[in-house]
């Protein structure tokens, strides 16, 4: 089943509890939180205190995307604050195997993220270890950017490896997802779809998520 995962980067940060509650009642099961450090990406966002506040506010699984140069140093604090899933960029982790194991031993699901220019092959030796792989379909740092279609080739490649090797990792996409490109994303083999502006920019966010879930179901039913 395909999950639509709202990214709070596009929400009103002064009203997060009110922004999230209707989505939770409307059937969303995960929330995406973008952590940016102003070094790895040219933007700054939030830290563990916000995750701790969200943890008190919602039962949704908190999917924390670390766009920071030193994830080994900060991942444990995010997990202690209540993150259920933590993803780190391949580009920031010289000891990726160790980082993945550390996140899992701290009690969270571990994901690895690939920037648009980073090949899937760089994950060959950790795919049996990771819980999920996040394919960036924009260069990270900002919401509301244009989708980079090459991400679909990377999803297809990962899906093929997954099937051929009998592995269990999930495939997530992040950046520029719209109601127009969603069907192609699902047909390529993606199961977890992050959406910022497409959800929070909609006049009726719950209806938009339902619309996206419908598109995803339709596309999944024609997958071969
Ligand atoms: C970009 C972030 C994304 C962002 C996606 O660096 O990782 O999660 O919120 O936003 P949209 O869906 O608006 O492109
Ligand atoms: Zn993200």
Image (cartoon, rainbow, N blue to C red):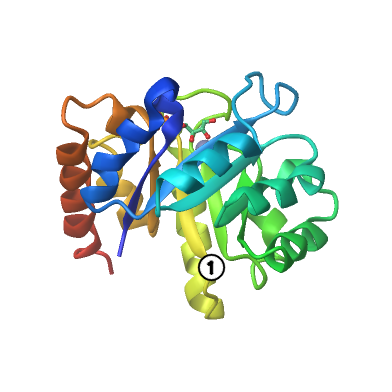
Task: Identify the image quadrant of the C terminus.
Answer: bottom left
Residue farthest toward the bottom in the current orientation of the protein: 166
Residue 57 figure quarter: top left
Measuring from the top left, give residue 149's x and y in whole percent. 42, 37
**From this viewpoint, is residue 144 visible?**
no
State the residue at coordinates (47%, 64%).
159
Left or right relative to 118: residue 85: left
Residue farthest toward the right in the current orientation of the protein: 94
Residue farthest toward the front in the current orientation of the protein: 56
Q: Is residue 37 above or below residue 67?
A: above
Label 1 environment density (alpha carbons within 10 Å; few <14, some 14–19, many ≥20)? some
Left or right relative to 176: residue 97: right
Task: Identify the image quadrant of the N terminus.
Answer: bottom left
Left or right relative to 164: residue 215: left
Measuring from the top left, give residue 114's x and y in whole percent. 62, 45
Q: Is residue 21 above or below residue 87?
A: above
Q: Is residue 79 above or below residue 44?
A: below
In this orientation, which residue lies closer to the viewer: 206 or 220?
206
Measuring from the top left, give residue 64's x and y in whole percent. 56, 45
State the residue at coordinates (80%, 39%).
70
In this orientation, which residue lies closer to the viewer: 137 or 121?
137
Disc 1 residue: CB within 8 Å of ligand 2: no
**From this viewpoint, is residue 111 visible?**
yes
Say what secondary structure mark 1 lies in.
Answer: loop
- Residue under label 1, please give it: 169
Residue 42 figure quarter: top right
State the residue at coordinates (33%, 38%).
20
Measuring from the top left, give residue 24's x and y in whole percent. 29, 48
State the residue at coordinates (22%, 34%).
205
């Amino acid at each position: 089943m395909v999950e639509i995962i709202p990214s709070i980067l596009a929400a009103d940060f002064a009203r997060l509890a009110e922004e999230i509650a209707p989505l939770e009642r409307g059937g969303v099961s995960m929330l995406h939180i973008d952590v940016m450090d102003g070094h790895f990406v040219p933007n700054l966002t939030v830290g563990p205190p916000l995750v701790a506040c969200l943890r008190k506010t919602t039962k949704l699984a908190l999917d924390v995307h670390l766009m920071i140069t030193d994830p080994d140093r900060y991942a444990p604090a995010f997990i202690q604050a209540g993150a259920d899933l933590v993803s780190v960029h391949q580009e920031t982790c010289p000891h990726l195997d160790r980082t993945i194991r550390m996140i899992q031993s701290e009690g969270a699901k571990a994901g690895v993220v690939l920037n648009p220019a980073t090949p899937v092959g760089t994950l060959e030796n950790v795919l049996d270890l990771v819980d999920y792989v996040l394919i960036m379909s924009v260069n990270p740092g900002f919401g509301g950017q244009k989708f980079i279609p090459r991400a679909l080739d990377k999803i297809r490649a990962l899906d093929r490896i997954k099937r051929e090797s009998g592995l269990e990792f999930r495939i997530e996409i992040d950046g520029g997802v719209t109601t127009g490109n969603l069907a192609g994303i699902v047909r390529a083999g993606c199961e977890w779809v992050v959406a910022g502006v497409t959800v929070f920019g909609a006049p009726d966010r719950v209806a938009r998520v339902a619309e996206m879930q419908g598109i995803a179901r339709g596309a999944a039913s024609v997958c071969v």
